[in-house]
Amino acid sequence: MKKVGRILFCFVPFLLTVGIQILISVPFIGIGTAYAICTADGSLSIYDLYDSLMNILTRSTFNTWLSATYGLSALIVFSFWYQKRFHAADVKKIKTFFNPVIVLAIVLITIGLQYFISYVANFTALLFPDWLKAYENLLNVVDMSHVTPVLAIYAVFIAPVAEEMTFRGVTLSYAKREMPFWAANILQALLFGIFHMNPLQGVYAFVIGLFLGYVCHKGGSIFLSILLHALFNLWGTFVSDNFMYGVNQPFFFVFWFVLSLVLLVVGFLLFHKGIVKRDQGVHKSEISSDI
């Protein structure tokens, strides 16, 4: 029973992050409601006030600030939890987890993963067209296509750190204590997918989560998965609209898919090589310091 309880505890970070979202959303909705009432004509009906409120809640500016506030809150909570519970390495030592080979590998993995995930999303949409419609409706309702400074900071800096601390940090660390890594990685990736609250996003977030969990575990540092996540979001925010030229043509459709696999394979081969080189260097420095 104790083991079952410890396994169930792995779900607590996910439930907590949902709770934080709700707690942050309540005052934002309250402010939006107050603004709608104050700016509305006194003769407007309740339906008009509702339409005014929905117009406020679906603005990109409103959702950007809501997301950024939630992200900062989650970042603080889970970074503290991860640091205290798992004795995470001092940020001052962050450079010890990287070398040029590892950084190059993560860049290649980022690009390859972007291509690969686009195929995962398109294949999922073909199998479940209703999921695609729901996703398109969500994009139409909540327009965040215009990249503002706040949105860029959230997408590239806040979200990667907050989500990595939550899922690859706290959740994966607890799960690895109770089950083999492969099972723990699937669990945290599944929760990461559910966290996105949209079936289509959930599927490709699950796949991304598997890669992030592997990089974090194999590289021995959450800083590595944070870098991969940040670069992935950076590419998706500023580059993704133009990076698959001619995908509707059979040749390019196959070309981009093969390229994604090549980039991923080469990236992970370099990643493992970089990890070995890094660890050998750390081992030599420890021997030298002992002497």
Image: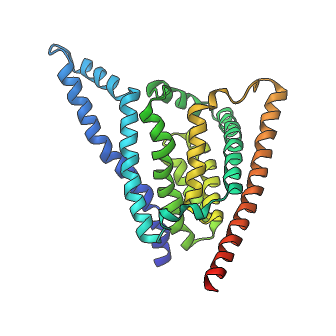
Residue 7 or residue 64, whichever sits in front = 64
Q: Position of residue 131 (x, y in %)?
A: 57, 34
**Residue ID at (76%, 56%):** 270
Q: Is residue 35 above or below residue 24?
A: above
Task: Locate residue 128 relative to residue 85 in the image: left or right.
Answer: right
Q: Position of residue 241 (x, y in %)?
A: 63, 27
**Residue ID at (67%, 51%):** 106
Task: Locate residue 268 relative to residue 200 in the image: left or right.
Answer: right
Task: Locate residue 133 relative to residue 53 in the image: left or right.
Answer: right
Instruction: For residue 199, say whether it is visible.
Output: yes
Quadrant containing the C terminus is: bottom right
Q: Position of residue 122 (x, y in %)?
A: 68, 34
Instruction: For residue 1, say whether it is visible.
Output: no
The residue most toward the bottom is 291
Task: Locate residue 26 relative to residue 244 in the image: left or right.
Answer: left
Q: Position of residue 254 (x, y in %)?
A: 82, 34
Indicate the colouring scheme.
rainbow
The residue most toward the right is 251
Identify the image quadrant of residue 247: top right
**Residue ID at (58%, 51%):** 227
In this rendering, the count of numbered labels is: 0
